[in-house]
Amino acid sequence: MRLRLICVGQKMPDWVTAGYADYSRRMPPELPLELTEIAMAHRGKNPDIPRLMQRESDAILNAVGPRDRVIALEVGGRPWSTEKLAGQLEGWLQEGQDVSFLVGGPDGLADACRQRADQQWSLSPLTLPHPLVRIVLAEQLYRAWSITRNHPYHRA
């Protein structure tokens, strides 16, 4: 089983790359966390936002495995506590199904991504910058794994 973070945006600042890499490296070999970056559609003067979001959505959905469980990160999604995430993770591990987490760009995810999603998850009612979501998501997945294995990280 693997966890895949599919997100819009490339060429992240060093602090984002380092933060994400730190937590993804901590994941155990039997549960790798992989990052797939999708190029953000260029937003020039008077951009056609729905068309650009559709282009990004097509690329995101092409990166999702045909049998993946899909979790869309959405402000309007259901909030999960860390313990709830740990329970979800344990269930996914038992199923052995790969899980793809979808993170949109500055305008969010297109309807097609939300429709493909098995679940919609909100990390916070706050609007978070999409680069920061990578780090928060990676840390929470590592923390959830640490709970499922009674690892001391969660209590630190």
Image: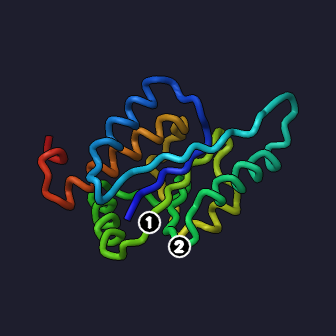
> Which tag, 1 or 2, sits closer to the chain's start?
2
Quadrant location of the C terminus in the rendered image: top left
Q: Nearer the viewer, residue 81 or 151?
A: 151
Q: Nearer the viewer, residue 44 or 25?
A: 25
Q: Whole-Å distance between the Cαs marked 1 and 2?
A: 7 Å
Identify which amino acid the numbered label 1 is placed on. Asp
Residue at horizontal 17 percent and vertical 44 percent from the top: 153
Identify which amino acid the numbered label 2 is placed on. Arg
State whether residue 12 is above or below residue 141.
above
Quadrant location of the N terminus in the rendered image: bottom left
Q: Residue furthest bottom?
A: 95
**Helix, strand or loop at disc 2?**
loop
Residue 118 in picture, x, y percent from top left: 53, 70
**Helix, strand or loop at disc 1?**
loop
Residue 82 in picture, x, y percent from top left: 30, 54
Proximity of marks 1 and 2: CB atoms separated by less than 8 Å: yes
State whether residue 135 is above or below residue 74.
above
Residue at horizontal 65 percent and vertical 38 percent from the top: 106
Binning the other alpha carbons within 10 Å of mark 2 as few (below 14), some (14 to 19) or many (20 upward) gives: few
Residue 20 in picture, x, y percent from top left: 40, 37
User: Quick check: can you spot residue 12?
Assistant: yes
Tell me the tag on residue 67.
2
Q: Which residue is mark 1?
A: 98
Query: In terms of image quadrants, where is residue 46?
Result: top right
